[in-house]
Amino acid sequence: MQNNHLISIVGAGPGDPELLTIRALRRIEEANVILYDALHGDEILELAAPVCRKIYAGKHYQDGQHQTERQDNIHRQLKEFALAGNKVVRLKAGDPFIFGRGAEELEFCLSEGLQVEVVPGITAGLAAATCFHIPVTLRGVNSMALFYTGHKRDGGFDDIEVVASVLNTHAPVMVYMGLKSLAYLSDELRNRGVSPEIPLQIVSRVGHPDQQIFTTNLGEVAEFLTRNDPPMPSMIILGSHARKLG
Amino acid sequence: MQNNHLISIVGAGPGDPELLTIRALRRIEEANVILYDALHGDEILELAAPVCRKIYAGKHYQDGQHQTERQDNIHRQLKEFALAGNKVVRLKAGDPFIFGRGAEELEFCLSEGLQVEVVPGITAGLAAATCFHIPVTLRGVNSMALFYTGHKRDGGFDDIEVVASVLNTHAPVMVYMGLKSLAYLSDELRNRGVSPEIPLQIVSRVGHPDQQIFTTNLGEVAEFLTRNDPPMPSMIILGSHARKLG
């Protein structure tokens, strides 16, 4: 497919360059400018042309800058680089539409009348499941899977009752950005009737050579975390367990 | 990464060859045998070597064969081809772990002691969302997204109350294989307090040149379907709406 877009919001997948889509690879190779977040590895950026400008736009991007200010700055750069005639890639970990703020950046570009496309990526939850053989759906067992951000807001979790009800149907929940608050999440779920026995997998640094899996259950995870310190980024998968690696 | 596996259970994504991952492409190119389901397009199979055996293993694979029998037959073939020293690719639409029975085939291979890997793919729900600019998560609006099979079992939908509760948090639900029962699903959800006003998108043949989107809402979809006949396969996205295409 011919790329007539000035701005491509591209999902980079979990970090392993082999888990890029072919379209994502092409967009990276063609880019004049790449605005990237923390990708936890440089291999993907090295796929860009030597003349491509690579600009870090992730957290701690500029000291003292607030989140909204940082996001506005990204929008401003997307627009300026595109209007100057560049092929701009906005590179995001995982999939742009799963907890990646891709939708916010898309809406900005559309509101400014900029030619924009979104290129999907392998989201970290599914990469973690496949790399460590953790089934997401099983015929006759579960008919759904929930993707959830474990990032607390205003001191609590959003819609925690719904998360509990999904787990109670024997379906899995993939928790993004949830490691810091995991002991608290475990309490909140058990307080809503979720069994302490349900399996809990922490998949660290999925898609990287040092990826690893930590296995416990909902009732024991708080104690587990006093003895273990899974490296970031981590995906948490509740309600399904890893099968023996072949 | 060196491929020492005899069997690769590979997600082919939604159908567009550019939405294959690089690893999936390599496995297809290296395969001696590919067991494939209906992929709704031959372009992906044409990426295999000319000498590769391509065997259809999808529905209507053999007249009068039951589902369990068909699945057993796939397992038997995976084992026989692998033990004969072939590089076997089991190619599945979308992601093998999202309503694709990849987990069942993985468990068979592991139980037989066969060297097996799973390669993730872009699942149809996320492909539909990105191709048609339908946000899945929006900061400050929703903290979850549900993947659900709209395939009825024993005459009803599984866990429909949970689906309703997800929609009532303003989070989207991506419904797989739900087109045939969509009018009934709409009734069931409205009977559980979901607003008839929530947006409903039917994305037909995502990832193919003739992909298209149909837009309605939960309350009007039954009437809509008497006037429109969206081509299969279709993804249904409830609770989020398509933004203007750039």
Image (cartoon, coloured by chain):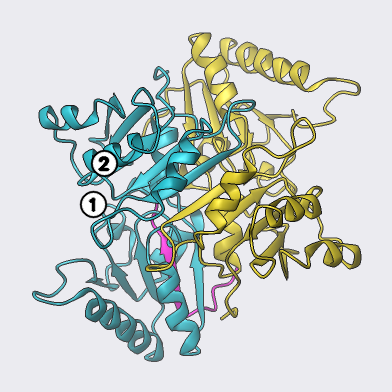
Chain colours: A yellow, B cyan
| Residue to which mark 2 is pinned | B205
Which region is colored magenta? B1-13
Q: Do the residues labelled 2 and 1 touch (CB within 8 Å)?
A: yes
Determine the chain carrying the residue at label 1.
B
**Quadrant location of residue B151?**
bottom left
Q: Residue B125 carries which label?
A: none
Q: In the displayed structure, does residue A95 sit left or right of residue A208?
A: left
Q: In which quarter of the image is the N terminus of chain A?
A: top left
Mark 2: amino acid: Arg
Q: Quadrant of the C terminus of chain A?
A: bottom right
Q: Residue at x 31, y 29 (%)?
A: B218
Q: Is residue B194 visible?
A: yes
Residue B121 drawn at (x, y percent): 46, 54
Circle 1 — which element?
loop
Q: Residue at x 14, y 35 (%)?
A: B229
Q: Which mark is residue B40?
A: 1
Residue A104 drawn at (x, y percent): 59, 23
Q: Which residue is drawn at 55% across and 30% down?
A: A9
Q: Which residue is at the front of the view, A169 or B35? A: A169
